Amino acid sequence: MSDPVLPPELLFGTATAAYQVEGAAHEGGRGPSIWDTYCRTPGRVARGESGDTACDHYHRYPEDVALMAGLGVDLYRFSVAWPRIQPTGRGPANPEGLAFYDRLVDTVLEAGIEPALTLYHWDLPQALEDGGGWRDRDTAHRFAEYAGLVADRLGDRVRRWITLNEPFCSAFVGHAVGRHAPGTREGRPALAAAHHLLLAHGLAVGELRDAGAEQVGITLNPDHLLPATDSAADRAAVERARTLHNRTWLDPILTGAYPDNETETWGALADGAHRREGDLEVIAQSLDFLGINYYRPIMLRDAPHTEPDPELRTAVDIGTEQVPFEGVRHTTMGWPVVPDTFADLLVDLNRRYPGLPPVFITENGSAEDDRPDTRGRVRDTGRVDYLRDHLASLARAIEAGVDVRGYFVWSLLDNFEWAFGYERRFGLVRVDYDTLERHPKDSYHWYRDFLREHRARRTAP
């Protein structure tokens, strides 16, 4: 199968996140995060694993940057660990923490790669969680303070800034499903966390603009949602899920309004007690780009609430149930591989939100059963097919009028995959977790060759 052809000006990169790759959890003045606590709670993470060492990117980043240079990427998306900058989530910046990101950014730039910095990829300082965390409005203000500290130090070299990564996961997977830190199952408090994350984004945008940031955006993970049948009940279930997954984030940011079906989605829980006048104006500041993470579609049907008492329901108990996709390949995450839905989502968002900002695909990739052969080679053909087919789908979205400016593969390295520990591998590069040696997979070589062809079109007369 031939590789897709995309516009020559499209930028390409790869991505990581601090807690998943850095390690050095007790070095350089770093304070504990909610993920340190979560990993030490029995039964939370597979095999009791943690990000204490992870890929040791904190010490081995020059080797990892060299791997990126070998790929020929334009961009490297990484996140800053808030507890490295403010160990307790407040107060002056930790000099050792800033110095590490100074070194990382300089090394990336010296390799001819542009850094794209995410301020929050889920590692809230534990001290802030002890005071209420994202349920508490003050955390939004603490985040803005932190954003200003990082921008003051790195803003002279970093052009692209992402405030939050997937606040859906922070608010709902963390506070309602309980499968991410802090690991609670809540109703109103989870909805308050969602709003305060949005407020934190808006406040941080202001801080970044004041610091002279050139481009500011946020990364969301909107889902392409499909009804199991064409029944009115299943279609209504999809609309409730669209509010939970998509509209809660996109509507305030892009339209300056809260979703108009919150009561149908959450009932009495949607009382908005955590909102204040003027919040929407802060949240809905203009963006230079919108980051979108995409992996798979979701099929849903109407289903009874798991908790009969509306006051005791979690924020994700909205009367829906997932239905498995039949007849398609699934990754080791159990996610269906349906590449056409990638374009469907992007085109649908472009239709629903006139004036949609330029889009960066900030994550796209697959977890595969990556086993090295006797010579150490990883023949991850499933990942190569996944990337090729999703890039072809992306090309269709661009042809349909979606303004896409860049694409990042998740991930550069195999890494700590949250509650799954180290058993799920997304990397272009295999990490031997016993020795921490890096071994490029077949997908690494495919992506390198694809980017060579893409650059050749970019420089063709």
Image: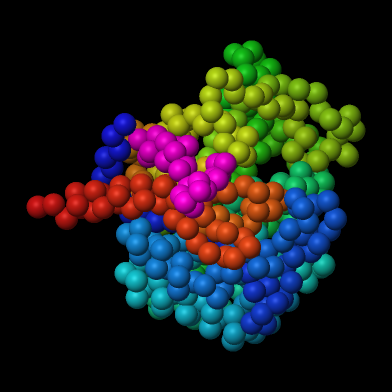
| Residue 17 higher or lower than 230, as above or below | below
Residue 203 placement (x, y as % from top left) = 58, 65
Residue 239 placement (x, y as % from top left) = 62, 28
Foreground: 183 or 431?
Answer: 431
At 62% from the left and 39% from the top, the residue drawn is 333
At 32% from the left and 69% from the top, the residue drawn is 112
Q: Based on the picture, tell me whether residue 370 belongs to the magenta stretch.
A: yes
At 60% from the left and 38% from the top, the residue drawn is 332
| Residue 233 higher or lower than 348, as above or below | above
> Would you say 331 lies left or right of 106 here?
right
Residue 447 placement (x, y as % from top left) = 36, 49
Residue 385 placement (x, y as % from top left) = 42, 36
Q: Based on the picture, tell me whether residue 36 belongs to the magenta stretch.
A: no
- Residue 271: quarter of image: top right
| Residue 231 higher or lower than 443, as above or below | above
> Would you say 130 lies left or right of 167 here?
right
The answer to whether residue 344 of the structure is visible from this angle is no
Foreground: 433 or 263?
Answer: 433
At 52% from the left and 55% from the top, the residue drawn is 430
How was the colour assigned to the protein in this rendering? rainbow
Task: Please give the count of numbered marks on the rendered protein.
Answer: 0
The answer to whether residue 177 of the structure is visible from this angle is yes
> Would you say 264 lies left or right of 312 here?
left
| Farthest residue, direction left | 461
Which stretch appears magenta? Answer: 367-392
- Residue 119: quarter of image: bottom right
Q: Quadrant of the N terminus?
A: top left
Foreground: 421 or 313?
Answer: 421
- Residue 331: quarter of image: top right
> Would you say 338 lies left or right of 82 here?
left
